[in-house]
Image (spheres, rainbow, N blue to C red):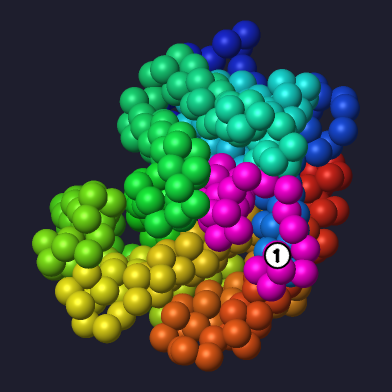
């Protein structure tokens, strides 16, 4: 996370103390004492539940009362259901640190959670209500989150993080486009899905480029001399620019040679970027290593997308799932586990349960990418889905106590 611009203290208290006081002043359920608590837990439960529903829905064993085609519902449930909840938990926790302003806690936080939950129910049950109403309920959350974030960023004069706000609005635009394309029955392959996915991938490149080397440097610095991650500089700006160009090209024309070349260039640059962060020195602490393994799926996705666009026999779904199941799934779990431990007063180290969660999500992502290359892929798809459920259900169980109880002294 970025360092905040100094802001004036109010009532004689420095910003960090004011933030802590605001959280301590909340005497209701601990679950509503910080943004990461309800949204990380809700995101994990939803992710496991949505995948558990998707398996029998895919085989026709059950029917989900939604107007979306089955594949469209699956994509929307993850891309515009799970990810916005994680994004909300991250932003509502990070923004007070960026700006020094008071966090959103208590009943205003509960209202945001209710809006997000209403969207999940509206889309899943959209066949039972007018389609415009279901879409409107679902579309309300991201603009509301952007409004809350904008108020805090602008009031705190934290202009450096305005790109994060722009990303939230782009994801909201992608969700709108997805709903507009849904009547065709192929929204999962449309502009709305690609816009949302590409924006989230770029957001991971942007924020991951800050936190992965920062957390790695902090951990390595406590363990004596040795090589440290390269500081942020021009190379990172070049890699981000190349990634942005490649993603824009992929949104517009994913099968074009130009997009393919741009994706291959981005893959090379982001692989070098990751190497500069010396992740191989962190293998004794899974809480740090997982950040590097998650980021590895970014150049992998670019590489697969590039070969797919150039007609090299690589299916586009391999690139998509390298980014979705691999980069997004693994990175969000890595951030959720680390943030939960840190913000609830736990030791920043991965125990057995956390390590098992990481193993499950890495295996789920690997199997899902591999399934794209295998004609008889039912077993791989099933294994990937079950491992995905295990990872997110495991997070829900292992972290429910710290998320729903007061911070340790």
Q: Is residue 58 magenta?
A: yes
Instruction: Determine whether 267 is above or below 163 in the image.
Output: below
Q: Nearer the viewer, residue 368 or 340?
A: 368
Q: Residue at x 40, y 74 (%)?
A: 318
Which region is colored magenta? Answer: 57-84
Q: In this view of the protein, can residue 243 be seen by the observer?
A: no
In the image, taking residue 392 as reference, residue 72 lies left or right, namely: left
Q: Which of 254 and 408 is in front in this view?
A: 254
Q: Where is residue 347 in the image (x, y as percent from the top left)?
A: 70, 60
Instruction: Determine whether 374 is above or below 193 in the image.
Output: below
Residue on which the image places disc 1: 57
Q: Which of 263 and 50 is in front in this view?
A: 50
Q: In this view of the protein, can residue 135 be seen by the observer?
A: yes
Instruction: Determine whether 378 is above or below 293 in the image.
Output: below
Q: Residue at x 54, y 86 (%)?
A: 377
Quarter of the image where one finds residue 221: bottom left
Q: Residue at x 26, y 74 (%)?
A: 308
In the image, taking residue 344 as reference, residue 8 lies left or right, namely: left
Q: Is residue 281 magenta?
A: no
Could you classify mark 1 by the number of other residues whose Cα lies within 10 Å: few (under 14), some (14-19), or many (20 or more)? Answer: some
Prevalent SS, magenta region: helix
Rendered-image quadrant of the C terminus: top right
In the image, taking residue 302 as reference, residue 337 lies left or right, namely: right
Quarter of the image where one finds residue 161: top left
Q: Residue at x 49, y 17 (%)?
A: 151
In the image, taking residue 287 as reference, residue 311 lies left or right, namely: left
Q: Where is residue 110 in the image (x, y as percent from the top left)?
A: 76, 28
């Amino acid at each position: 996370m970025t360092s905040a611009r100094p802001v004036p203290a109010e009532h004689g208290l420095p910003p960090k103390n004011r933030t802590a006081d605001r959280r301590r002043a909340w005497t209701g359920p601990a679950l509503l004492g910080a943004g990461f608590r309800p949204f990380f837990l809700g995101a994990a439960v939803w992710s496991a539940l949505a995948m558990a529903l998707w398996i029998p829905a895919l085989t026709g064993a059950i029917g989900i009362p939604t107007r979306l085609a089955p594949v469209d519902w699956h994509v929307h449930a993850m891309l515009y259901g799970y990810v916005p909840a994680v994004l909300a938990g991250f932003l509502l926790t990070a923004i007070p640190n960026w700006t020094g302003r008071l966090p959103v806690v208590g009943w205003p936080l509960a209202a945001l959670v209710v809006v997000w939950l209403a969207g999940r129910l509206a889309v899943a049950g959209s066949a039972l209500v007018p389609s415009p109403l279901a879409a409107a309920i679902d579309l309300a959350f991201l603009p509301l989150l952007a409004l809350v974030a904008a108020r805090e960023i602008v009031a705190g004069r934290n202009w450096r993080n305005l790109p994060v706000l722009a990303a939230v609005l782009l994801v909201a635009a992608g969700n709108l486009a997805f709903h507009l394309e849904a009547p065709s029955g192929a929204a999962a392959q449309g502009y709305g899905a690609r816009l949302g996915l590409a924006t989230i991938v770029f957001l991971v490149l942007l924020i991951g480029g800050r936190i992965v080397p920062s957390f790695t440097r902090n951990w390595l610095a406590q363990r004596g001399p040795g090589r440290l991650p390269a500081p942020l500089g021009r190379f990172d700006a070049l890699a981000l620019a190349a990634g942005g160009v490649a993603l824009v090209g992929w949104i517009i024309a994913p099968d074009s040679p130009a997009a393919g070349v741009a994706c291959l260039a981005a893959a090379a640059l982001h692989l070098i970027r990751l190497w500069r962060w010396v992740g191989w020195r962190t293998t004794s602490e899974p809480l740090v290593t997982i950040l590097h393994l998650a980021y590895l799926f970014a150049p992998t996705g670019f590489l697969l997308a590039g070969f797919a666009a150039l007609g090299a026999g690589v299916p586009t779904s391999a690139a998509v799932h390298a980014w979705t199941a691999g980069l997004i799934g693994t990175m969000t779990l890595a951030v959720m586990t680390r943030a939960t431990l840190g913000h609830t007063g736990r030791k920043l180290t991965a125990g057995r349960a956390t390590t098992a969660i990481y193993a499950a999500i890495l295996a789920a992502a690997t199997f899902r990418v591999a399934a794209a290359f295998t004609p008889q892929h039912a077993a791989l798809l099933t294994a990937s889905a079950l491992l995905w459920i295990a990872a997110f259900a495991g997070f829900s169980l292992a972290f429910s106590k710290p998320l729903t109880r007061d911070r340790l002294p």
